[in-house]
Image (cartoon, rainbow, N blue to C red):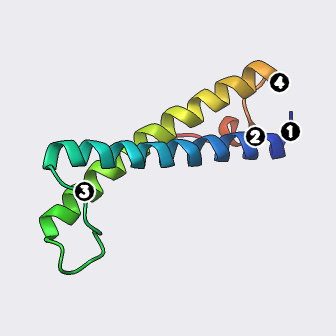
Amino acid sequence: MGDATWKIIGTGSAVLAGLAATKAADKVWEKAAGDKPGDPKNPEQPLRHALAYAAVTGLAVGVARTLATRKAAQYYAKSSGRLPEEIQDSSI
């Protein structure tokens, strides 16, 4: 497996996880608030609603992307015998 394969697997898993998390956050919002989330970019939408929605969605997407990318890296390492270079070279 090469760098191109990792970019497809890593990016693809993160994008799909982000989309799924956004849909899940919307469903949670609808259950909790009793209505569909408004457009946070709309200036007529109350600011506190827009910020709360952004916080919920941002947290859900961030967690989902992190977990999906970690799983994709585990799969890549299991298949190729090493972590992707992008991850090997990174430091916290």
Q: Which residue is mark 2?
A: 6
Spatial separation of the CA atoms under disc 4 and disc 1? 9 Å
Assign a secondary structure to mark 4: helix
Q: Amino acid at mark 4?
A: Ser
21 or 85, which lies in front?
21
Give the residue displayed 58% in from the left and 49% down from the top: 15
Q: Which mark is residue 2?
A: 1
Q: Tell me how far mark 4 sits from mark 3, CA to CA.
A: 44 Å
What distance separates the C-alpha of mark 2 from that of mark 1? Answer: 6 Å
Is the C-beta separation of discs 4 and 1 under 8 Å?
A: no
- Amino acid type of disc 2? Trp
Q: Residue furthest front?
A: 35
Residue occupied by mark 3: 36
The answer to the question of whether label 4 and label 2 lie on touching residues, with beta carbons closer than 8 A, is no
Q: Nearer the viewer, residue 67 or 23?
A: 23
Q: CA distance from mark 1 to mark 3?
A: 43 Å
Q: Earlier in the sequence, mark 1 or mark 3?
A: 1
Which badge, 3 or 2, comes first in the chain's sequence?
Answer: 2
